[in-house]
Amino acid sequence: SRQKKKDKPDVAWSVVKLIRERGGRFLRRSYTTMQGEYLWVDIGDDRAREKTCQALREGAPELRKKRDTSSSSDDDENEESPKKKMTISCSDFDSDEK
């Protein structure tokens, strides 16, 4: 069944909470140090939820396609390692949180 539009922010909050509980962080690159290293800062829960909503929205067609494809193939080929890390690239964040 499809999620109702009003339920989607709750799903995003759940994703953010789960990632945080497992030690994950939501970061953006703040600036580059004089040594050429990047400084990464946490974007906070509100911004993390917004970006999670965006990622779910933009990734939905691809996820549906992957789901539909994987449902027709063997389950053994689609099992993921429980320790597999998910990386969300946030390099395109606007710099409004300095």
Image (cartoon, rainbow, N blue to C red):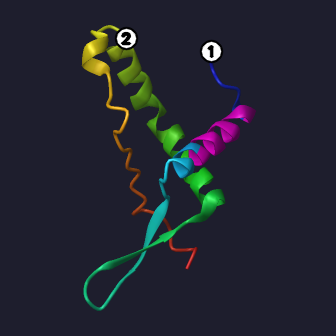
The x and y percentages for residue 38 are: 33, 77
Can you identify the residue that label 1 sits on? 1
Left or right, 46 with respect to 84, comes to right
Mark 2: amino acid: Ser
Above-or-below relation of 6 to 86: above
Residue at the location (63% across, 20% down)? 2
* Mark closest to the chain's N terminus, 2 or 1: 1
**Image-quadrant location for residue 32:** bottom left
Residue 42 image point, x, y percent: 52, 67
Answer whether labels 2 and 1 touch (C-beta < 8 Å): no
What is the span of residues highlighted in magenta in the rendered image?
A: 6-17
Question: Horizontal and vertical percent for residue 95?
Answer: 51, 74
Magenta region includes residue 66: no
Residue visible at 72% across and 33% down in the picture: 7
The disc at residue 71 is 2
Work out whether 85 lies above or below 28. above
- Write the residue at 39% across / 63% down: 91
Tell me the amino acid under the disc marked 1.
Answer: Ser
Q: Residue at x 60, y 64 (%)?
A: 44
Q: Which image quarter is the C terminus in?
A: bottom right
Magenta stretch holds residue 10 = yes
Image-based side of 14 in relation to 57, left or right: right
